Image: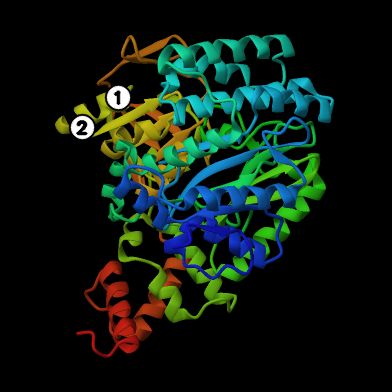
Amino acid sequence: MTWIHPLSAEVEESVEVLGGKAHGLVVLRRLGLPVPPGFVISTEACRAFFQAGQLPGGLGSELTAAVAGLEAATHRRLGGPERPLTVSVRSGAGVSMPGMMSTVLNLGLTTEATTALADETGDPRFALDSRLRFLTSFASEVLGVGQESLRFADRATAGPDTGVSRLAEVIEEVEQLVRDRSGEPVPEDATRQLELAIAAVFSSWHTPRAKTYRELHGIPDDLGTAVTVQAMVYGNRDRHSGTGVAFSRDPNTGEQVPFGEVLFGRQGEDVVSGRSLTGPLHELADREPGVWADLLDALDRLEGHYRDACYVEFTFEAGKLWVLQVRPGRFVGRAAVRVAVDLADAGAIGRDEALLRVSPQHLQHVRTPRIAVGDASGVLTRGLGASPGVAVGRVATTADNAARMAAQGPVVLLRPETSPLDMHGLAAAAGVVTARGGPTSHAAVVARAMGKPAVVGAASLVVDDAAACVRVGGRSLPEGTLIAIDGTSGEVVVGDPGIVMATTDPQLHQLLGWADEIAGDATDRDETQRLASAQAVLLQRQDPSRT
């Protein structure tokens, strides 16, 4: 049994073996797009890990060889005293589960390697910032130190203003916290760090948040996750570095315009966590036009390959773009209809395929409801609409409270930002509002996947867990207050306002016309029935044995 595979264009293993993340990286390689070198430990190894209760036999020797190959490719050495190699260790199941499992970045930044990185770059602040990021992710994901206990370290890495001496102090505080909470220090042996991180990523398959996500989406429990190990590229390297996420089309409307967020001078977890104030994707065009041009080219080539809207995660270091992940956009509702129709009109897919891509359930969300607000005084706060629709429910300020309160009626979860630890609350809530984050933050991505309204980046919102209330300006709302949120406009309103329905869009009319051509007379049938009838005919044509 071979447990480890290189991330190369020649790899032929399936997505079930490599996991979705690594399989996407292989596609990127084949398209000639820039991908950091690395390797993937298969889902088969994960299943063997759970059977044996430890890393499977033979994996150690394969890991040694894979690391040696990565060192040769990068001309660096993992944790080395000169030209140190650092790696990211990421999960990736065969079915995407965004943010549900563990990630460790900057692995290999031992104390010695951090000094070497500072000497190599001439930038001790960058080296210490990267070391601190490694320590917090390793402590949280591998050693089980609670994320809340590490918030002070997150604040230190939240921008370019934290000086070298303060970073050094925070590193010492984190190291002491780790010793106090786990009874042992973070290992100074980079190989041991890697082994522990791989086991932690495998183990994260069975965390409560991951189990909840699989239950919601009907994902089998026995698939397991792959582990992707790649050479690090640093979005926090200098003023020409950064990170972001991008869709080839707007996931809310399906319009053919690049959509996403970017953050300069930071690493990827700062974007997806929702803790940081991001900028719109098009800011790249002015600040890093070369990166912007390369990103547009990548999105165009990927959409051509997948014949679908695509989502990518990317980092740029010293003005060079690196693509770290790709997957089809999997839009829902109105956006799914528009993308299918536009691709058919462009000849990228046929009309039959367009009809089969849109589920009848998507049609329930095409005529997006909107809050009918008479004047601005009725609005409590505004953020960014991140997932269309209207949710009306009682305020819940924690995920635990949302799960408990939902038994007595709809709730809306309000948080500073969400994390995978909030998954049970997101599942129970009718909608979500966050004070921080943007339209590709954790809250937004999960809400869209579940078809729930979301408002993010409501900067005036303060969530007070201890007092079980939220505040906006001088106004305070206790938990249990009835509110409504509009995931299109970003408005949050106290009470249960009137709701209006958006009119039918032209793409839906066009799609249903194609459906009627396939299925015949549409008299006395609603839109969902018209689409379902056409799909039944098309599926029967593909497989005459269907009844």
- The reply to whether callout 1 and callout 2 are in contact (CB within 8 Å) is yes
Q: In this figure, which residue is indicated by the disc labeled 2? A: 406
Q: Position of residue 331 (x, y in %)?
A: 45, 57
Name the foreground residue: 283 vs 16. Answer: 16
Q: Amino acid at mark 1?
A: Ala
Which residue does the image show at 25% across and 21% down from the upper left?
A: 480
Residue 237 showing in the rendered view: yes
Name the foreground residue: 381 vs 542. Answer: 542
Work out whether 408 lies above or below 217.
Answer: above
Quarter of the image where one finds residue 472? top left
Q: Which mark is residue 396?
A: 1
Work out whether 308 lies above or below 315.
Answer: below
Q: Amino acid at mark 2?
A: Ala
Q: Position of residue 413 (x, y in %)?
A: 34, 29
Which residue does the image show at 69% across and 14% down from the upper left?
A: 162
The alpha-carbon separation of the residues under discs 1 and 2 comes to 9 Å
Residue 489 showing in the rendered view: no
Q: Secondary structure at mark 1?
A: strand
